[in-house]
Every structure is written in C-alpha cells, then in structure tokens.
C-alpha cells in the first residue's frame, strides 16, 4: 500500500527545484537535521501513524465532509463542492499539522512547543495540540495583535499556553517571529519550533505538507464517491500555503485537474504594502530560513504586506508553491478584499456556511472562474470557519450588506 506520507519531493536537502533548502545559523543546522531524521523515521512507524489517525478521526472529527453546494452551483452555472475543513475541532485545517508536530516533539523527548502567531489561529491550534499531548507551549505574539485578537489570546491562556508579548518595532507578526526565534535559539534541544505553514527551513515545508495531505487524500476519494470521477478544478487560498498544498498534493499527478492557488490582492495589487500577492508580484529571495518567491523592498528586506484576511498576509510563500508556479502546474490568481467580503456573504446567505475570510478568497475565485465561463466542476478547500471574523466584518462592512447594529 502506498504510504500516506509517500511524496516524491523535495530532495534530501529540502529543495523543490531551486526553492526551499535551509538557511539557518550554524547552531541550528544539527538540530534541524535531527528533526528531519526523527520525522522520516517516525512517519514509517505504525504506532505513530495509528495514533495520528486516531486523533484525526476521534478528536478532530475527520474525515471532514465534501459538500455539493447546490445553491451556489445553480446561481453560477457550474458544480461547486466544498471540502469542509471549517468543521474540524478548532475550526480550521491548522489542527492537522499541529497535532503531527506535537506528536513528533513528544516522540523526540522535547518538553515545549514554541511558535509565533499573528491573528492567533496558529497559536490556538498549537496550544490545543500541546494540551492534548502534554507539552508546555509558549506563543509569541506582537503586543498590537494581543490587543486586537483578544478572544484568541484568552483561548490560548485557558488551554494552558503562555502568551509572550513582542514589544519591539511595530509589535506585530514580524516582531513575534523574531521573539520566538530568539527564544528557540536559547534551547533548541528541549523545544520544538512548530512552524504554522509549509514555510521555514527544511524539513518543515515537507512535514507540514505531509500532515495536511490528509485533506487532499480524503477529498479525492469523497469526490469520486459523489461523482464517479475527478474534479476539473481544485481551488484553495494561499497564505503560507499549507491548506493549498494539503488539497493539491493528491492531484499533482492528475494532469486533467487544473489547480488554482488564490493569493490576497488586498486593497491594491499595484501598490507595495497594500497586498500580499507574493507569487504574483514577488521575486525569488531568502527569508525566514528558506528560498522562495518573496515580497522584498529595495534593500532585500521583507516588505510590509496587507490583506483583510490576517491569515494570508505573509511576505513569502511555501517553496513548493514557487516550484509549482515556475513549472506551470498550479495557476496562481488573486482576489481583493472587496471580492473576498462579497464571497463571505454570498456563501453565508446561499449555503448557510460562514467561511473564514481567508477561505472566502477561494470561494471568490470559484465564482470568478464561473463568471468567466468555466463550466467544469470545482472542488474548493474551505480552510476554516468565520466565527473569528464576524465582529470585524460586521463593524467594517456590515452596513454594505444590510447587517446594521443589533436591536
Ligand atoms: C491560517 C489560515 C490560512 C492560511 O494559511 P495557509 O498555510 O496558507 O493555509 C487559511 N485559512 C485559514 C482558515 C487559516 O486559519
């Protein structure tokens, strides 16, 4: 039987074509080699595979359904199916890789998980996994984000994690990365830096993809069962790119299936700092320990980025996406704030499903493709639910969609 983790890429140095690799301080090289070796060993162990499968099934609630969105399909004249990652415990796909990382850390004898978080989604998923597996958890978060994302901060604290404020610079995600990385360097032996997407140095882009591949493997089977065949199109939003790699990975060899990655073009894709469309507007460079397309300023530093979806505003992207772009296997499109918010309400009102604003970017692209004449079927990864976004959306956009203040 083909092992679920049996993917042909990357090479043994972590390269997908020219992208990926590992660009880290010398003292981390051996630590990362150990993580790679431990991961490659445990993913062959029946005990590990069984434990992860048990948690996916009985804890996360997998398999998540594939739902034929008939009202959306009827309105836009093509068949649209949703892979319901929004129904997972904690409300998004991130739990799939956080559980894998937590089990790996436990197996390696580490005592603490450490990570940065922006909006708090990765922090909550990781704090959840840490609580379950029995590990300490330190989440680094910018002071500004701590104020903004209060409910997620409280969730992490309830789950027993420590939230460590990053107080320098702009006090947001970039500073949280610096702070977490510094803390990690203090003790890389007893801690595991649990990266939140298919980014970072080798082996993280491979490992996080492998853990997320459950999404594509399930969806492919479910789609076959529902329709007897393969989808004509698979669509997913791309921040770091983990939910997209998760669903794409099952279809990479099926050349008849068109793959669509959707980046956020924010307020204006033509203006630096107003979008986070890395593959559309970026160029190859090295950042956060790996080579990929990135949005960089004249000095080669990460550019300011923006999207209405805080889970998508990252100035780089997973290296496998850069490779898939260059070889033309995946088409990368972009959706702006307005289109995403329109799709957020459209899915809510036509199907009774409130999507995360991140996932609404994928919904918007499905609608755009259909409006452009695409009549093939579409399988869309609904990466998360919108509970976390409702207050923000109503405050900022409610009036435009007939949602005024509560009575
Ligand atoms: C974090 C997040 C994303 C973006 O992350 P990827 O690694 O690009 O998948 C997308 N959707 C939701 C719901 C998220 O929480």
Image (cartoon, rainbow, N blue to C red):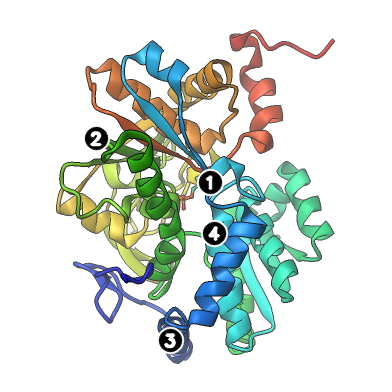
Check disc 3 and report the residue beneath it. Answer: 41
Mark 2 or 3, nearer chain start: 3
Are discs 3 and 1 less than 8 Å apart at CB?
no
Are discs 3 and 4 less than 8 Å apart at CB?
no
Q: Is residue 102 visible?
A: yes
Neighbour class for label 4 at 10 Å: few (<14), some, many (≥20)?
many
* Distance from Cα at disc 3 to Cα at disc 1: 28 Å
SS under mark 4: helix
Are discs 2 and 3 less than 8 Å apart at CB?
no
Mark 4 or 2, nearer chain start: 4
SS under mark 3: helix
Q: Residue at x 72, y 10 (%)?
A: 404
Decide if residue 375 is on the left or right side of residue 131.
left
Check disc 4 and report the residue beneath it. Answer: 96
SS under mark 1: loop
Question: Which residue is more in the foreground, 402 or 91?
Answer: 91
Name the mark on residue 232: 2
The C terminus lies in which quarter of the figure? top right
Q: Is mark 1 within 8 Å of ligand 1?
A: no
The N terminus lies in which quarter of the figure? bottom left
Q: Is mark 2 within 8 Å of ligand 1?
A: no
Viewer-side label of 1, 4: 1
Neighbour class for label 2 at 10 Å: few (<14), some, many (≥20)?
some
Check disc 1 and report the residue beneath it. Answer: 64
Q: Is residue 193 visible?
A: no
Residue 287: x %, y % from top left:
39, 65
* Distance from Cα at disc 1 to Cα at disc 2: 21 Å
* Distance from Cα at disc 1 to Cα at disc 4: 11 Å
Residue 181: x %, y % from top left:
57, 73
Q: Quadrant of residue 234?
A: top left
Q: Residue at x 29, y 54 (%)?
A: 321
């Amino acid at each position: 039987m083909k092992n679920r983790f049996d993917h042909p890429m990357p090479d043994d140095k972590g390269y997908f074509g020219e992208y990926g690799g590992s660009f880290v301080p010398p003292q981390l090289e051996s630590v990362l080699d150990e993580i790679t070796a431990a991961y490659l060993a445990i993913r062959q162990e029946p005990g590990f595979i069984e434990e992860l499968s048990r948690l996916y099934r009985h804890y996360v609630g997998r398999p998540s359904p594939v739902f034929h969105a008939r009202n959306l399909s009827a309105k836009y004249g093509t068949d649209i199916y949703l892979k319901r990652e929004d129904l997972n415990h904690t409300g998004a796909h991130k739990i799939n890789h956080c559980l894998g990382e937590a089990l790996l850390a436990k197996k390696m004898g580490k005592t603490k998980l450490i990570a940065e978080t922006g909006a708090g989604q990765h922090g909550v998923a990781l704090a959840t996994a840490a609580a379950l597996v029995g590990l300490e958890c330190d989440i680094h978060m910018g002071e500004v984000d701590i104020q903004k994302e209060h409910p997620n901060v409280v969730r992490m604290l309830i789950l027993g994690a420590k939230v460590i404020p990053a107080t320098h610079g702009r006090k947001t995600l970039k500073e949280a990365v610096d702070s977490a990385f510094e803390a990690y360097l203090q003790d890389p032996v007893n801690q595991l830096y649990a990266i939140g997407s298919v980014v970072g140095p080798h082996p993280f882009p491979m490992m996080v993809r492998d853990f997320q591949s459950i999404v594509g493997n399930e969806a492919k089977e479910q789609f076959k069962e529902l329709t007897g065949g393969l989808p004509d199109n698979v669509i997913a939003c791309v921040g770091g790119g983990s939910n997209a790699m998760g669903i794409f990975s099952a279809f990479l060899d099926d050349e008849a299936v068109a793959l669509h990655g959707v980046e956020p073009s924010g307020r204006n894709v033509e203006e630096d700092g107003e979008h986070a469309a890395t593959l559309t507007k970026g160029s190859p460079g090295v950042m956060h320990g790996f080579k990929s397309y990135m949005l960089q300023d004249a000095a080669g530093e990460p550019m300011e980025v923006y999207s209405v979806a805080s889970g998508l505003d990252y100035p780089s992207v997973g290296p496998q996406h850069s490779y898939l772009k260059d070889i033309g296997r995946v088409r990368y499109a972009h959706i702006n704030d307005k289109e995403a918010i329109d799709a957020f309400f459209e899915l809510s009102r036509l199907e009774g499903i409130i999507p995360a604003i991140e996932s609404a970017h994928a919904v918007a692209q499905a609608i755009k493709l259909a409006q452009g004449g695409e009549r093939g079927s579409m399988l869309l990864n609904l990466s998360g639910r919108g509970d976390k976004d409702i207050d923000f959306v109503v405050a900022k956009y409610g009036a435009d969609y007939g949602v005024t203040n509560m009575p």
